[in-house]
Image (cartoon, rainbow, N blue to C red):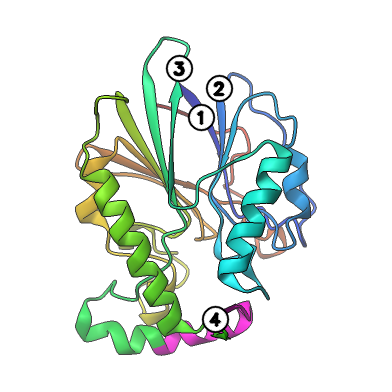
C-alpha cells in the first residue's frame, strides 16, 4: 500500500492547496490541518480514503472533550476517517490488511525522565497558554495535558501489545501527532525542556509497528529505530522557511 502523508498544513493562515499524489492508495493527515476546521473540507471527496489524527491546534480555544465529539461529527460529514484513539483496518489491493492505529498522543513531559519533568512542564506552560483550551471546566494547562497524554499512551500501549500482526491484520502503521522519539527534535532548537512539548519517549512502543507517522515538529524526518521506520512530513509555516523540504507528493510504502 502506498500512503501520502501530510501534516501541519495550518490552513487557517497558510496559502496551500493540497493535491492527491499520483499512485497513492490512502492519505494520512497527521494533525494541525486547520485550527478552525474549515480546511478539512478540502479533503472531502478525495479520490482515496483519508485518515485524520487531530493535532493540538485542532483544539485551540475549545473545550477538549466537547471538541473531540464535535470533530468526530464534522469528519463523518466530510467522509474523513477520524482516528482519535481509534483503529481502522484497511485492505490493500493485493489483499494484505493494514491496521492503522491513531492517537494525538499528547505530550506527557517525561521525555527527559521524571527528573526533568518539572522543567518540561514549566516550559510547556507557554504553549498551552497560546492554545487557550479548556478541559473539565479548567484551563487545559501543562499538567492537564500530561493527564490526557498518559491516557493516550495507556490506550496506545494496550493496542500495540496485540502485536504487529494479528488475526485481523497483517501489518501495523501508527499515526500520532506528537513525535515518538527525541530523534524527531527540531534541529533549530535542539534538546531543551521545551522539546518535551513536541516529542515523547515512546521508543519502547515502536517495535509494535512497521511504520510510525507523526507531525507537530515543523521539520521533516525519516529514520529507523530497530525495524520501525519513523517519518514526519510536516509543512509548517512557509514564511519561516519551514516548507522548503516539505514534499507534498511524498509516497510511503507499507
> Which secondary structure lies at badge 3?
loop
Marks 3 and 4 sit apart, C-alpha to C-alpha, by 39 Å
Label 2 packing within 10 angstroms: few (<14), some (14-19), many (20+):
some
Pointer 3 or 4: first along the chain: 3
SS at mark 1 in the image:
strand
Q: Which residues are magenta?
A: 122-136
* Residue highlighted by disc 4: 128
Asked if residue 131 is positioned above or below residue 97 in the image, the reply reads below
Label 3 vs label 1, nearer the camera: 3
**Nearer-N-terminus badge (3/1):** 1
| Contact, mark 2 vs mark 4 (Cβ under 8 Å) | no
Sequence-wise first label, 3 or 2: 2
Marks 3,2: beta carbons within 8 A? yes
The percent position of residue 202, horizontal first and vertical second, equals 27, 58
| Dot label at residue 25 | 2
Please give the name of the residue rendered at 80% of the width and 53% of the height, measured from the top-left corner. Answer: 15
Q: CA distance from mark 3 to mark 2?
A: 8 Å
Callout 1 crowding tier (Cα within 10 Å): few <14, some 14–19, many ≥20? many
Q: Is residue 200 above or below residue 246?
A: below
Q: Read off the residue under disc 3.
A: 92
Q: Give residue 149's position: percent from left, percent from top.
A: 38, 68
According to the picture, the residue beneath numbered tag 1 turns out to be 3
Distance of label 2 from label 1 (alpha carbons): 6 Å
Kindly report the distance in space between the C-alpha atoms of the residues bearing marks 3 and 1: 11 Å
The secondary element bearing badge 4 is classed as: helix
Q: Give the number of the mark in front: 3 or 2.
A: 3
* Foreground of the two, 31 or 187: 31
Amino acid at each position: 500500500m502506498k500512503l501520502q502523508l501530510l501534516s501541519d498544513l495550518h490552513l487557517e493562515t497558510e496559502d496551500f492547496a493540497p493535491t492527491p499524489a499520483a499512485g497513492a492508495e490512502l492519505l494520512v493527515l497527521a494533525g494541525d490541518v486547520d485550527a478552525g476546521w474549515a480546511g478539512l473540507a478540502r479533503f472531502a471527496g478525495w479520490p482515496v480514503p483519508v485518515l485524520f489524527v487531530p493535532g493540538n491546534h485542532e483544539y485551540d480555544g475549545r473545550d477538549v472533550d466537547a471538541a473531540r465529539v464535535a470533530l468526530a461529527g464534522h469528519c463523518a460529514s466530510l467522509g474523513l476517517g477520524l482516528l482519535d484513539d481509534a483503529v481502522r483496518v484497511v485492505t490493500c489491493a493485493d489483499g494484505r490488511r493494514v491496521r492503522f492505529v491513531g492517537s494525538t498522543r499528547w505530550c506527557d513531559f517525561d521525555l527527559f525522565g521524571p527528573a526533568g519533568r518539572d522543567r518540561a512542564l514549566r516550559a510547556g506552560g507557554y504553549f498551552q497558554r497560546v492554545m487557550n483550551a479548556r478541559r473539565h471546566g479548567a484551563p487545559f494547562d501543562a499538567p492537564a495535558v500530561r493527564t490526557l497524554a498518559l491516557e493516550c499512551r495507556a490506550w496506545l500501549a494496550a493496542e500495540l501489545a496485540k502485536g504487529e500482526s494479528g488475526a485481523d491484520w497483517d501489518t501495523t502503521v501508527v499515526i500520532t501527532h506528537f513525535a515518538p522519539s527525541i530523534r524527531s527534535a527540531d534541529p533549530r532548537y535542539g534538546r531543551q525542556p521545551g522539546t518535551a512539548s513536541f516529542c515523547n519517549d515512546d521508543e519502547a512502543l515502536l517495535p509494535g509497528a512497521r511504520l510510525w507517522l507523526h507531525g507537530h515538529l515543523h521539520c521533516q524526518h525519516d529514520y529507523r529505530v530497530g525495524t520501525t521506520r519513523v517519518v514526519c512530513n510536516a509543512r509548517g509555516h512557509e514564511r519561516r522557511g519551514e516548507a522548503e523540504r516539505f514534499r507534498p507528493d511524498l509516497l510511503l510504502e507499507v
